[in-house]
Amino acid sequence: MPVILGIAGSVRARSYNASLLRAIVELAPDDCRVEIASIAGIPLYDGDLEESEGVPPVAAALKDRIAAADGLLLVTPEYNNSLPGTFKNAIDWLTRPSSDIPRVFGGRAIALAGATPGPGGTRLSQAAWLTVLRVLGTRPFFGRVLFVSDAAKVFDAEGRLTDERVRDQAQKFIAGFAAFVKA
């Protein structure tokens, strides 16, 4: 059974992207498992810190989880019409040392999804991620898109996905990505 590792790009307690990721876990097809990982605790990238102490254990553990997974799902917020710095920072740590990029990202099936309270979904953030994913040598999934706009209207106060249209989109998205991972 293929394993997809999902990472929400926000560490906020009531993150719409973490809520979307939890919904995707529930909606995944029975022949695939989606696990959740976090970027919480990853420090700001600092080459001096890397040189003196190496890759922080929290980042090293996440690298190993990605390398062990069959696919990677990045559930990204959109900040100022682009990718969020905290998420990009985490990815930067995951590429250290650079000789480890092929093990962690090379040829890895990867998909992007995201939720935002704004009207545009996370189209611009997801587009900004493409240059990063290209340089990492990933295998991006373009079969379906999942841009959730007006997130405050599709999740309830407990973070549960309540909008049936978005639920259907999310279910088709994860089914498509699962099939892509298996191919």
Image (spheres, rainbow, N blue to C red):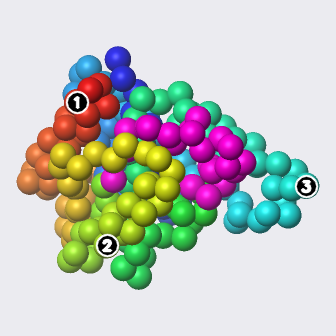
- Residue at mark 3: 52
- Residue at mark 2: 124
Amino acid type at image mark 1: Ala
Whichever of labels 2 and 3 marks the residue nearer the N terminus, that label is: 3
Amino acid type at image mark 2: Leu
The CA span between labels 1 and 3 is 42 Å
Residue 9 in the figure: left or right of residue 113: right
Q: Does the magenta stretch include residue 95?
A: yes
Amino acid type at image mark 3: Ser
Whichever of labels 1 and 3 marks the residue nearer the N terminus, that label is: 3
The CA span between labels 1 and 2 is 25 Å
Whichever of labels 1 and 2 marks the residue nearer the N terminus, that label is: 2
Q: Is residue 72 above or below residue 147?
A: above
- Residue at mark 1: 179
Instruction: Find residue 176 and report its image quarter.
Output: top left
Give the SS element for disc 2. Answer: helix
Task: Give the residues in magenta.
Answer: 91-112
How many residues crowd around disc 1 within 10 Å: few (fewer than 14), some, or many (20 or more)?
Answer: some
Instruction: Find residue 57 and report its image quarter.
Output: top right
Give the SS element for disc 3. Answer: helix
Instruction: Find residue 110 and report its image quarter.
Output: top left
Residue at the image position 20 percent from the left and 77 percent from the top: 119
How many residues crowd around disc 2 within 10 Å: few (fewer than 14), some, or many (20 or more)?
Answer: some
Task: Decide if residue 62 is in sight here.
Answer: no
Residue 173 in the figure: left or right of residue 165: right
Give the SS element for disc 1. Answer: helix
